[in-house]
Amino acid sequence: MSTWRFRTFRRLWLTLSLLLCVLSLFVFIGFLRRGADMTGSAPRNLLPVRREQMSWTNLSPATLRGLESRLEVPFYIYDTPSVSELYNLCQSAARSILEGEWPPYLPKGMGDVNKKNYDEVYWLDQLANDSWRVADPDKALVFVIPVYPVLSLERACEGRSRKKTHKLAAEAVKEIVGMPYFRRNGGLDHIVMGIDWRFRYAGGIRDALGYEFATLAKNITWGRKLAERDLGHIGCAVTAPFTSSLTFLQKAYQPFEKETLLERQLIEPEDVFEDDKLSTSLNPPSKYDWFARDYLMFFQGQASLRRGYLYRRLGFKHLTGWDFVAEFCAEGECPRSSNVFVSSSTTHKHLLFLDVSGKEVKQALPDCPRKHEEREVSGVSLGKFERCRGLKRARSINEKNLALLRAATFLHRLANSKLNLCFRGDDVTSSRYVDGIRTRTLNVLITEAKDMFKYAIPFQCEIPWQKFTYVVDGSEYKQDPRKALVPILKEIYTDHAAVKEKLRLMDYYSRKILWDAPNSTTARSVLRAMTRQCLTTEIKADFLRRTSQITDIHSHPLFAKCPFSDRSARRENQTNTRLEG
């Protein structure tokens, strides 16, 4: 009996000991995880704790420079016979764009025109004499294929022959794939810039450069407005910014002041100013004081019944005529501003609006600018360029000058506004965020925020976008557009220090974002982003082993952590996207 009791007691003791060991193991694992969190480890798409808590108030230029990436990306530009001939074919058109003279045969209308899609011109221009360029391909990490997909698609190059372009491109492909440095990584370290929406499909690439090049595209990296490759027509996408609308109006890499548009007589004061501001049009207070800008909110673009334009139509319905000052500011505390809400849609002339009581009404959009008798509608006061259509052709003008007039009115009104409402369009992004930065107008991104930062915001590793950009998620905006914007408008009116800091940071980082800004470094930012979004660890490690004596490759800037939150989609996350409206 005693033996049986002893054995039972021993089994019970062993069981309890085992349970205690398992419990201790779970406690130890929890402690390790907590310790990792406290030492700065964070999920891939979030910043470490110490960085999130960084104070951004009045950071000196020296401090900002200290946060700059130390990564240099040596690149090689192909110069084989057919590649060079294909490149030279488009040089006349490319140089014209850089000189501010729009080439013949390119679209000149203001709608969905490709003035915003000529990254390729600035890309190759900036890389041509960059100090990162190497003559020896064995010393290169990235290989640049110097072609102009959009210019070729528009047949703007010498001869304007698609057959000739396709034949040259086919020969160029043979030269490229025959190189040992192409076969080394299967082409993923090769890049072409082409952000036009038509290159979302293989057919657009075939139309531009032919079947053989479209086949090559499946293996290489492309600079795109969206980091998506769900159709398998490209090897990888690196997110690149649009070009600004200013591309159409002046020489590249020049500063911009809205008053020059009037001085050059591209527009008249009546095209852009309210009637009581006409006398100071050439020397307005806003030239010296950002807070003296005449307009509060700006949107000018299509607002038809297309599914992707829902947020735009909601803006016309809820935001036009909204007297925010009367609702939220004490008397005399905030100056009342007009807004710019101009529809460029030609097919839908009626939209829903709210009258003074908040009731829905359907009304026709008059031509811009509104006449005096049209500025009081259903009890709501409206500005000259608020809730109206297009631009009335007030004088005889040819097609080219009409396009200049439309582009100039767009940019002047934007540069005279405080907030640039970047509503999503057919996909999550909007080219207007670039125009906002070019005109020093604070952007308000109104879209699916998670997808916008995953697929469409470039250079997040280098640029703290949310420190100078307002973001309103589409789900919140759809519920109540006015309520979603109240915190932003309150800051504009009551916290000038916060607004000035946003403007300062936007100015500092503008040279990375704007292709056509003075001292632009956008091409370098694309190269850096490519190493994060498209190049595998193996490609980068192989490069370091071939070109350096470094023993710990992870100590190299190629593997450095980002100073800012980077949610950009890597190659493995660029498929199965659903970004269309």
Image (cartoon, rainbow, N blue to C red):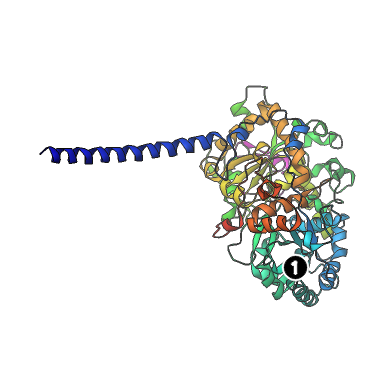
> Hey, which quadrant is residue 375 in on the image?
top right
Is residue 287 visible to us here?
yes
Farthest residue toward the left? 1
Quadrant containing the N terminus is top left
Residue at image location 72% in from the left, 68% down from the top: 182
- Residue designated by label 1: 153
The residue closer to the viewer here, 242 or 380, is 242
Q: Residues within 10 Å of mark 1 (few under 14, many from 20)?
A: many
Reply yes or no: does residue 378 show up in magenta.
Answer: yes
Q: Which quadrant of the view contains residue 386?
A: top right
Viewer-closest of 199 and 316: 199
Q: Is residue 228 above or below residue 375?
A: below
Label 1 sits on a secondary structure element that is: helix
Point out residue 309 in the picture as x, y percentages from the top left corner.
60, 52
Disc 1 marks a residue whose amino acid type is Leu
User: Looking at this rendering, what residue extends furthest in the front direction?
Assistant: 3
Residue 289 is situated, as x and y percent measured from the top left of the image, at: 79, 30
Which range is magenta? 362-385
Instruction: Locate residue 526, reporting x and y percent.
Output: 73, 52
Residue 17, magenta (yes or no): no
Q: Front-most of 377 and 497? A: 497
Q: Is residue 245 left or right of residue 57?
A: right
Label tally: 1
The residue at the point 72 percent across, 31 percent down is 501
**Residue 367's x, y, as percent?**
71, 49
Q: Nearer the viewer, residue 49 or 123?
A: 49
Q: Is residue 117 above or below residue 216?
A: above
